[in-house]
Image: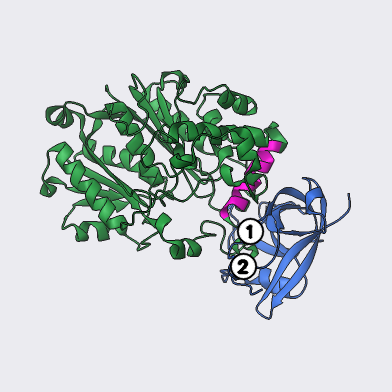
Amino acid sequence: MKHVTYPRSSLDSAPYWEGCHRGELRYQHCSACGEVVFHPRALCPYCMADALVWKVSAGRARIYSFSVQHVPLRPDLDTRGPRALGIAEVDEGFHMFAEFVTADLDALTIGDPLEVMFDRIDDALVLPKFKVLSR
Amino acid sequence: MSTNTLRGKAAIVGFGDSYCERGEAKSAMRLAQEAVSRALDDAGLAKDEIDGLLTGRAPMSDQRHQWNNIFAAYNKITPRYASEITIHAAGMNSMLKHAALAVTSGVARFVLCVGADAVASLPSARAQIGGMDADPEFEQPYEPIIPTIYAQMARRLMHEYGLTEEDFSAVAVQCQEWAVHHPYATKAHKGLVTIDDVMRSPMIASPLRLWHCAPWGPPGTAGAVIITDAETARSMSERPLYLLGAGECQTHEYLTDRMALRQSRLPLGDLPNITSTGCRIAADTAYAMAGLRPADIDIVQTASQFAHVELQVLAELGFTDLRTSGEFVRSGATGPQGALPTNTNGGWLSFGQPGVSCVIDSISETIRQLRGDALGLQVKDANIGLVHANGGMQACHSIAILGREP
């Protein structure tokens, strides 16, 4: 199947996507107010200081919420079966949307442990996803 | 929160709506023109007397920016006060407030508010907007459909508040009880359904099944409202409808990023979460402006793209507790025999979504009910109606309260 949806990236988030190409899940930390910042921003959205520093996550998370999507976005192009998509609560203190990869979609539950993996879609896109670990 | 002083000072003096029949195709522009023509006749106004023009978000079937400018030029209207009001499509509800601000301050005398769409009849256009309003950088690359985004909230409602799939299903059942009586409701022909029927419909994005999701349709709709100051309205019309309350609130844009909202001055519960919305804040603002309580409301239209949204909205509007909201709906409270007639045209779940004009459809239904001109089931003695609108991924909520008396 052909991947059709590429991220609408920006100057401010480029280091995040570069990180994915290197197998790093990056997030930001504000050295002025101490908040963890995700999604990537130019200035800190909490204190508005120009003091954001990039960090690398250890890649461990838990399922905050999820849905098993049975209908593809583009049925004409997408032959994948049902997939789990949801919000991951990453240990460093931020939340991100991702695909949760598991052989047992029916067993998924909120709180399941996750580990980041990097799916190389093509030369242009490496997409972080999460492997569902056993409870 | 400050309370504004707009209550009863502006009124609807002209109204028109237009609908596609099942299987009929009309452009959003034609539907909008038809609605405006009817609103002008209803007000007894010539087009040249319109000096203000507001439109909502551009029709999904058109998608040109500055649709207010396009609409004005298309119809040879030359407004001196005009804008597109967008807090997503919920801005169509807020048009009433913006128009009231204009006509009570002397900025304009007659403000025409228009909403239209006809994307339901255009499958190719619909394919292009499948993931619209999801984050184009951090959500869309995973290719979610919109039900999958809304399902994240449904899942948390089940986890945090003990709501069940049967609770969601009860909403769909009740919407259908109204829709079967409405000539343009897109699911009217499907007849009454039971909770079991809903629970047997195909899974779309768990826990949401087909009947938990608003369908596309009717093929197109439009509504037009002309607002002026209350005194002028009384001199022109025997049945003006007054804007009693209005409020709005935006809490986020993309759903996942809502989890980065860690603090707020507003009562949004324990942050971060995706189970509280700006509806409560919008409603509190509207009630305060109107000097009304939930018990004073005769009819309600909610913007429920998905069944669980109606439960959240009924709770945040102050009609029930979220934990018992499913029971509240199952009791028949929001149905044709209930004390709180809700979504009296079938709502977005059964009347359907023609596109962004589902917001103006809720306004049209409220105006018709308050005037005693319902196209479907007429609620007896409906004097005060509340219209709720929700835009994006529950990002923006807008409330308007309309009444027969100032």
Q: Which residues are magenta?
A: B146-158
Mark 2 surroundings: few (<14), some (14-19) or many (≥20) residues within 10 A: some
Residue at image position (40%, 33%) is: B181
Residue B364 is marked as none
Of all chains in the rendering, the one displayed in blue is: A
For residue B151: magenta? Answer: yes
Task: Give the chain letter at badge 1.
Answer: A
Q: Position of residue B310 (x, y in %)?
A: 53, 35
Q: Position of residue B231 (x, y in %)?
A: 16, 28
> Chain B is shown in which shade?
green
**Alpha carbon of mark 1 to alpha carbon of mark 2: how far?**
8 Å
Task: Give the chain letter at badge 2.
Answer: A
**Residue contact at pointers 1 and 2, CB within 8 angstroms:** yes
In the image: residue B377, left or right of residue B142: left
Kind of residue at disc 2: Ser
The chosen color scheme is: by chain
